[in-house]
Image: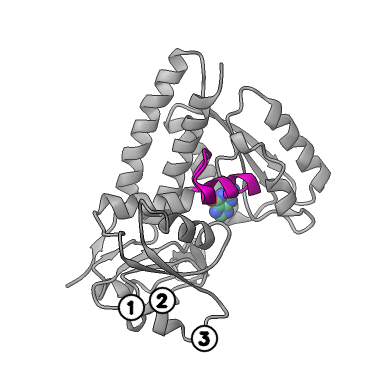
Amino acid sequence: MAAILMDGKSLSSKIRESVKIRAAELKEKGIVPCLAVVLAGEDPASLSYVKSKEKALTQAGMDSRDIRLPENTREEELLSIIAELNSDRKVHGILVQSPLPAQIDEEKVFSAVAPEKDVDCFHPVSVGSMVLQKPGFLPCTPHGVIALLREYNIQINGAHVVIAGRSNIVGKPLANLLIRKEFNATVTICHTGTKDLNFHTLQADILIAAAGKPEFIKPDMIKKGAVVIDVGINRVKDAQEKKGYRVCGDADPLVAQKASFYTPVPGGVGPMTIAMLMQNVVESAQRSKP
Ligand code: GUN
């Protein structure tokens, strides 16, 4: 039997509707939730992500401060823009789209964002707060994955979750969240140094594909009935497509014939990242003093 598709688009809409209500309540108190979205350079995928984020802000009745910088932006310029946004009381969240141009030290930039406006949870203090379960924001994609698992009543408690990928944005924080007592999963992280990847992926009750490699998780790498969460968003060349490329995940869609649940790409995890971002922005505005 084919897997049940986990509809991130529909859950994302539900969450964004509730954000819209919260934003409207704040507006009555004179607070308009606002996210500054900073994009440096012209990476087409990044441009498309930030446009989606800005559109979602508008739909939720929130403001976006769109900051576009050229590819050759100097690190000091970007740092000074962030310093201004940090002290701007009308701005409740700051998002610097990654990756940044090569001449800019990404870590330095993320560390310059005030933790109380760090809706991405990229600042070292935010990461530390997440690990220690102190107040702060949860990272958007990992939080979105957990929200989807919960929506579909997937048992996380006691489950063996195998994550393929150790990125700072997905693999590491997701592993950290899932081992919290409230989720209680046993987590294995696989990466390029893992000796027998298939051995590990075959053990997974829940397999998270987050390595940024197009369709590399194949049906023979998963246990029958496993839950497969595909975090990948890859653009691969395809002459048949009008745009010259197609978007695919990190898992071969054929895994759906063996899995019990599966997140499609697009329409699975992607929309959840945006929904959780919207939630963090409204939350930040709520925490702010008018
Ligand atoms: N690049 C890829 N994913 C993300 C994200 O969630 N936030 C930011 N800022 N950049 C990204």
Q: Mark 3: which secondary structure?
A: loop
Q: As shown in the figure, which amino acid type bears the numbered disc 2?
A: Ile
Of badges 2 and 1, the one in the foreground is: 1
Tell me residue 156's x, y (percent): 31, 59
Residue that mark 2 sits on: 217
Q: Mark 1 points at which residue?
A: 222
The answer to whether the beta carbon of the residue marked 2 is less than 8 Å from any atom of ligand 1 is: no
> In the drawing, does residue 228 fall left or right of residue 108?
left
- Let me know if residue 190 is in the magenta part: no
- Of the numbered discs 2 and 1, the one sitting upstream in the chain is 2
Query: How dense is the environment of label 1, judged by Cα within 10 Å: few (below 14), some, or many (20 and up)?
Result: many
Is 79 left or right of 239, judged from the image as shown?
right
- In the rendered image, the vertical position of residue 283 relative to residue 156, given as above or below: above
Which residue is identified by label 3? 195
Q: Are marks 3 and 2 in contact (CB under 8 Å)?
A: no
Name the secondary structure under disc 2. Answer: loop
Asked if ligand 1 lies within 8 A of label 3, the reply is no
Q: Which of marks 3 and 2 is nearer the N terminus?
A: 3
Residue at 77% across, 53% down: 104
The image's colouring method is: one colour
Q: Nearer the viewer, residue 284 or 230?
A: 284
Vertical placement of residue 220 versus 239, above or below: below
* Residue for point 39% across, 28% down: 20
Mark 3 vs mark 2: give the one in front. 3
For the point 48% across and 34% down, which residue is it?
57
- Give the Cα separation between the discs numbered 2 and 1: 8 Å
* Residues drawn in magenta: 122-139
**Nearest the eye: 124 or 259:** 124
Quick check: 199 left or right of 135? left
- Asked if disc 2 and disc 1 are in contact, CB closer than 8 Å, the reply is yes
